[in-house]
Amino acid sequence: MRHARRRIVRRVTRLAAVGGLLLGGAMVTQAAMATETPAGSATPRSAPESVVTNPGAALVKELGTSRTAGTWLDAEGRPVVAVTDEESAATVRAAGATAKLVGHSMNELKSAAATLRSAPKVPGTAWVMDYRTNEVVVQADSTVSGSDWAQLTKTATGIGSFVRMERTTGKFTTRLNGAQPILSTSGRCSAGFNVTNGTNDFILTAGHCGPNGSTWFADNTARQQVGQTVNQSFPVNDFSLVQYASGKAGDGADVVAIGDGNGVRITGTGDAAVGQRVFRSGSTTGLRDGQVTGLDATVNYPEGTVSGLIETNVCAEPGDSGGPMFSEGIALGITSGGSGDCTTGGTTFFQPVTRALAQLGVTLIVAAPSDNAGQGSTSPSGAPQPSVSPTQAAIAPGSTSPGSTTPVTGLGDGATLASRLTDPKNIGPGLLVIGGSLVALVATRYFRAEQDRRAYREYYSATWG
């Protein structure tokens, strides 16, 4: 009777241990899969944030173009406003910004630019308003002949002494050939930012990349079709829309690639400010940074003239066209063209994103904010450098702050199955159940073996002597 009870206890213990193993395994699996986004589901979207990159812009608007001559950020990121009289300077200082008295108003600078635009176009030339020196700077690359340079100098001299002439090395060219490369018969360009009209999704890229009807692929064998150009503006502007073949951009549409499998989550749009530190990503030269050096630039490319561009000292090379320019997760521009390269340095111009969006009637695609928004790593305003640490790759969509890094795959919460399986907070309870069950099984086996050994000894001991 006693042996029967022992057998029952052992069986019950073994069944409970096996059941515990199954239960623990189910708990671990559930914890690992609980946050995984179902296949085909899209990240919730939200309206993009509109960001003011330079508070001085409001003062310029308040005082008017006859009393101001632009605004920029100083080395510490504080706004500086160029003004033409002491009364305006006092208003600027009272608002907490720095005032700089200058001799020429924005109206005069714009008039000089208009005179240059009305002159015969010379490919290889460009001009931009330099707010910090209160001048209009005219540049000519190595392709401009001596006679054309002399004629341009004569036009500039007639405008006034605040027009400065400069010769530059290299050539001003569009950067045909981006964060992720897209290819067509027109060449190779970049996927810039993802945008939507509420019905269909598009890639916002450079207009010089190809005319309407251009078909784009993600590979050079023309098997992975991305979409087709449906709206192009070049020259005058330099932007276009590539409509996704599937109609939708899918998960990760709010992320731009910066290399090594990482990307920066884009949360809004803004207008660039002179002196602002910016980043550009391209498939040829990867992630590069620099500073905005001028606004409302005009460039006479060999293919035509484009105006209203952002001038920077960020380098770029052929293949970077259409790639995104941003700062602290704020979309600012798409790569147009420039001179130089990323070995010797150079000048790169960008089409402002806000102007392109307004003319195309589309909005930037950004992820909807979550309850944990703002709890991710932040990018201090004093050091707007996007984190490229791989540890940022597990932040959930919407919980990242501007400039934080996420995987470019757009996978659900951004975490891999392996990272969830190695997170003790997720799998701890399940592992405890499994561990307890294994102990019970081992103990049951040990006690059974000990009882069998005793029974064996008692049975045969009767024949030992």
Image: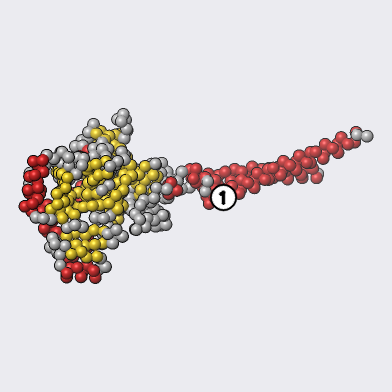
Crowdedness near tag 1: few (<14), some (14–19) or many (≥20) residues, C-alpha within 10 Å: some
Q: Residue furthest top?
A: 221
| Image location of residue 296, percent across then percent down | 18, 52
Quadrant the C terminus occupies: top right
Q: Is residue 190 above or below residue 92?
A: above
Amino acid identity at mark 1: Gly
Q: Is residue 301 above or below residue 100?
A: above
Name which residue lies at 54% across and 45% down: 28
Determine if residue 61 is in view: no
Q: Nearer the viewer, residue 172 or 52?
A: 172
Q: Nearer the viewer, residue 357 or 68?
A: 68
| Image location of residue 339, percent across then percent down | 22, 42
Please give left or right for residue 54 compared with residue 26 in the image. left
Q: Nearer the viewer, residue 74 or 250?
A: 74
Determine if residue 139 is in view: yes
Q: Which residue is mark 1?
A: 428
Colouring of the image = secondary structure
Q: Residue furthest right?
A: 465
| Image location of residue 140, percent across then percent down | 15, 44
| Image location of residue 384, percent across then percent down | 34, 54
Residue 90: quadrant of the picture = bottom left
Please give left or right for residue 285 compared with residue 57 in the image. right
Name which residue lies at 39% across and 56% down: 378
Name which residue lies at 21% across and 52% down: 294
Quadrant the N terminus occupies: top right
- For label 1, the SS is helix
Name which residue lies at 37% across and 57% down: 380
Residue 21: quadrant of the picture = top right
Please give left or right for residue 439 compared with residue 459 in the image. left
